[in-house]
Amino acid sequence: MNVKKFTAPTSREALRKVREALGPDAVILSNRAVDGTVEILALAGDDAAALAPHSSDSPMSAPAPHLDLAPASPAAEAAPSLVAHPAAPVLRTTPRPAPAVPRAPTRPAAAPAPAIDMDRISSMVAEAVASAKASAAAEMTSMMSELRAMRGMMETQLNELAFASTQQREPHKTVVLREMLAAGFSASLARYLTDKLPATRDGAEALQWIRTVLARNINAMSNEDALLEQGGVFALVGPTGVGKTTTTAKLAARCVMRHGPEKLALITTDAYRIGAHEQLRIYGKILGVMVHSVKDEADLRIALNELKNKHTVLIDTVGVSQRDQMVAEQVAMLQGVGTDVQRILCMNATSTQETLSEVVRAYQGSGLAGAIITKLDEAASIGSALDVVIRHKLRLFYASNGQRVPEDLHLADPAALVERAFGGQAAPKYGDAELPLLVAGAAQDPMLREVRFG
């Protein structure tokens, strides 16, 4: 019998030495602590099997079980114990009793571990993270919407209370606000100017101050020589039915009367409406001016190149809704011909302020040269058109009030237009109880910061 002794600072190190020297089938005979170290007596598995009886009838004839010499647990390190093989006698080398440590059972051979699909795991983790982010973003968006709605409601209520108090303290502001809303001006402009009113108790004096400020902020062309004498290429743009063709004919008549028909050329891009080209051709025949028809950017480029010796070229464009994609295509065509084409927007005075604002934003492009207000004779109030001109800082060239060519086209007179806006409305549309709600709901327009008061 070949018994060997192993010492180490810890049980884990001692067991490792046993495994390296005697193999995994070694039998631990004793395990004790000696002078701060751990001492183990062990026997090889083959030597232990030789000590057992070989009779087939004896229950001890079974081969020694497999011993797993895995590192001991921390509890085993703290309390060294004796491990004995069942087929061999236990040898004690000290009279002190030591607690027995049960021998670890033999473990069956481990099955091969299944392969781990890291790509699938990564995909699942990414999906979970994306789902969590989307859920959090949706909750945050919903919460912010609720907060904005709550803030708007509180601001509206506070504004109502504040304006109700103002009505009692400064009744002249109520008079001005009611008159501006009745004239067609927006609630945002009316509120802004009302807040800037100088101290006065006279409603008529306050209203006169408002008219003066409005007229001062309408950028009108004071002398048409700046347009007719300078010449150039001008394109009249705007939605369907605003009077572009008739306005083109009126401008053409003014040019012919000043420079003669040989200095003017007319171009139409309206190949969609039936008879649109013929309408302008009739006007051209009356004026003695040739009318050219183009279909696309290439045709327009060729036509402008042939007409570059003309003093003035007027282009009548096809009417397109401000919400149509063709608006952007039309603006791009006029900007891409290699010639400085000045776009003049025709604005229908009968349209609402919201509609006209949409039209300006759609046809703005890189910038409008100016605007012409049409159909003044058909509008019940023109405050909406003047409101858009003021807020969008448009240069106002002419105002058209009829179908006669060229009589019904006039230079824009700011004072006359403002007087027309306030003088043509019917009875006030809103009562004193409704004014706080209208003013409270009016959003602050950053465009109004450039309004001039002096």
Image (spheres, grey):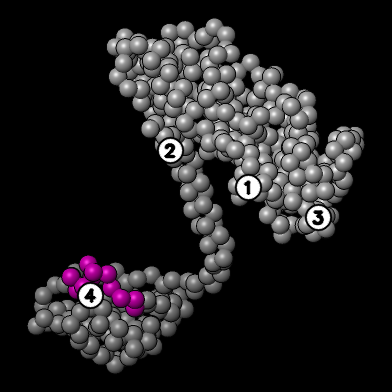
In the picture, the disc for residue 365 is: 1
Q: Is residue 85 left or right of residue 124?
A: left
Q: Classify 10 Å Cα crowding around label 3: few (below 14), some (14-19), many (20 and above).
A: some
Q: Which residue is mark 3?
A: 307
Pinpoint residue 145: horizontal percent, then vertical percent: 46, 33
Q: Is residue 37 left or right of residue 423?
A: left
Q: Say whether marks 1 and 2 touch (CB < 8 Å).
A: no
Label 2: element kind: helix
Could you tell me which residue is drawn at 46 percent across and 22 percent down?
211
Location of residue 291 with respect to 194 vertically, above or below: below
Location of residue 427 with respect to 208 vertically, above or below: above
Q: Classify 10 Å Cα crowding around label 4: few (below 14), some (14-19), many (20 and above).
A: many
Label 4: element kind: loop
The amino acid on which the numbered mark 3 sits, given as a three-letter code, is Leu
Q: Is residue 284 magenta?
A: no
Is residue 197 shown to the viewer in this render?
yes
The amino acid on which the numbered mark 1 sits, given as a three-letter code, is Gly
Span shown in magenta: 69-82
Label 3: element kind: loop
* Circle nearer the viewer, 4 or 3: 3
In this view, the residue in front, 420 or 67, is 420
Could you tell me which residue is drawn at 23 percent across and 88 percent down?
6
Q: Which residue is mark 4?
A: 82
Magenta residues: mostly which secondary structure? loop
Q: CA distance from mark 4 to mark 1?
A: 94 Å
